[in-house]
Image (cartoon, rainbow, N blue to C red):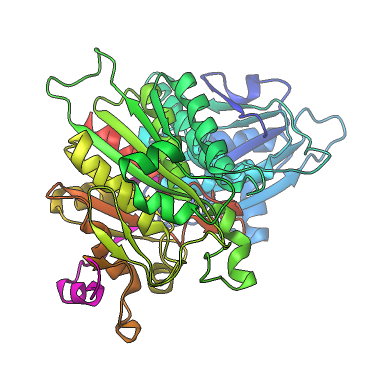
Amino acid sequence: MVDLPSFNLTTTPLTGLTGLDVVALPVRGGGSAGNGAGNGAAEGSGPRVGDADAEVARGLGIDPEAVLELQKAKGAPGETVVIPAVRRDAAVKSVILLGIGDGSPQALRKAGAALARQSRDRARVATTALADLEADAVRAFVEGYLLAGYRFSRKSEPPESVDQTVDLVVADPGPYQEAVDRGVVTGRAVRLARDLANTPANEKSPAWLAEQAELVAERAGLAVRVWDERELAAKGFGGLIAVGMGSARPPRLIELAYQPDRATRKRKTPHVVLVGKGITFDTGGLSLKPREAMVPMKTDMSGGGAVIAVMSALRDLGVGVRVTGLVAAAENMPSGSAQRPGDVITQYGGKTVEIMNTDAEGRLVLADALAYADRELAPDVIVDLATLTGAATLGLGRQYAALYATDEALAEALLTAGQASGDRLWRMPLVEDYRSTLDSDVADICHVNRDPRMGGGSITAALFLREFVGERPWAHLDIAGPARADADADEITRGGTGFGTRALLRWLEGLG
């Protein structure tokens, strides 16, 4: 793993900083009205570097406006024009004209990501991009920088890295320090979620995932309980047992518990339960996946990884509500002991389920955890997230997750948190007319749509999960699309993305 850069808020002008490798000067997009005094870009003007930053550039032998015109730059969020040092004795190795668009948090997230990629392996970076922005934009910039700089490797020669410092030049650090700190905490949590998802499945058994959760609990001041296969069988967790029975590496249920500090705790502390799918590798079981569909399945525990990552950050963010995280972890393998299509299993709480497709295993382990949360933990609200269905990806692509909810206020709060954080969600309907397709002749319910001609696979999966949450407010995030990426884009890096971590943290911060 690569160490995180350190961020230093400073009032020292760029001309007073020494030992800089990279200087990044902000460029507002054309037509932007600006976001405060000192930017120097008038409404309706083209892309432009502010007056003070232009003077810095000219002191380094660069005419920024001429360069922008030559490169046909527009100041779009994340657009970069890199100018190498023009003199051999120059103190600064390169100057980057960094597009920040309209200065919004969304634009600054892209700008931070772009600067991180252009400054990789440079020891000292400085920028005035945040000099006149709102705190939310500062946090977004820091998160974008940290996430775009993420790398994961199992090469015999690890990638070279440097201890990097990023100087953020502002007029007054006071209003920004909390935003920077929260950005760092959130960025660290997402990087943890990515590490968990990207770890190869030969290392990542359910027991390994439980061990990582125990390490997180120790660092973050959480209570932790891990249920092994004997306890799961004895207590009736039939979904976890059925999915894991084909593997030599048995299932686990991971329970992490956070109690807020007295200083941040509300008088009446709500209790939130987060539930994550933790399938450490998914072959499809006896309903075997094609080879190409199996390759990315080490990330099929991304929902569970996000839950662990969220739990890791709650105390540092001062979240004022009680939170329990459940990760239902199993490995779905084909073998002589694997579950079969046509089997009937008994989930936690006693509901019987007819198995039609062993590759629809995620909802079985989630059902156990959801029923346990409803019956034993007495939460005020339950939210689960899972790489659950290809149908969600077909409908929404790779940038949005499907959101289902039984409570309007909960749905709206999660949508708002998703938009603010960069984890974008799209509300989907729980279509009651589709519920009958889950009817079974031999069990209480079938776990997949019995009429594949109807489609709506993501909806029927959500309807199945709803059967296990009782009457409690509940939301389900089907993150199958955005949990994995095939290429780098803005703050997203190839592989596991840690999707859902940012949205859930923003939502929980808003609760207290």
* Image-quadrant location for residue 221: top left
Determine whether 149 is above or below 390 in the image.
Answer: above
In the rendered image, which quarter contains the N terminus?
top right
Name the one closer to the observer, 452 or 442. Answer: 442
User: How far across and down, in percent of the image, does residue 20 sit?
Assistant: 71, 27
- Of all residues, the one furthest to the right in this rendering is 88
Q: Is residue 79 visible?
A: no
User: How far across and down, in percent of the image, does residue 91 sit?
Assistant: 78, 27
- In percent of the image, x 42 and y 22: which residue is there? 177
Name the one closer to the observer, 23 or 356. Answer: 356
User: How far across and down, in percent of the image, does residue 243 sit?
Assistant: 45, 56
Residue 423 counted in the magenta span: yes
259 displayed left or right of 230: left
User: How far across and down, in percent of the image, does residue 150 sit?
Assistant: 62, 41
* Image-quadrant location for residue 211: top right
Q: Is residue 429 visible?
A: yes
* Image-quadrant location for residue 21: top right
9 displayed left or right of 94: left
- Of all residues, the one furthest to the bottom in this rendering is 453
Q: Say how many tags the image has.
A: 0
Residue 377 counted in the magenta span: no
In the rendered image, which quarter contains the C terminus?
top left
- In percent of the image, x 28 and y 20: which residue is there? 260
Name the one closer to the observer, 395 or 435. Answer: 435
- Of all residues, the one furthest to the top in this rendering is 262
Give the magenta part as a residue range.
Answer: 419-443
122 displayed left or right of 280: right
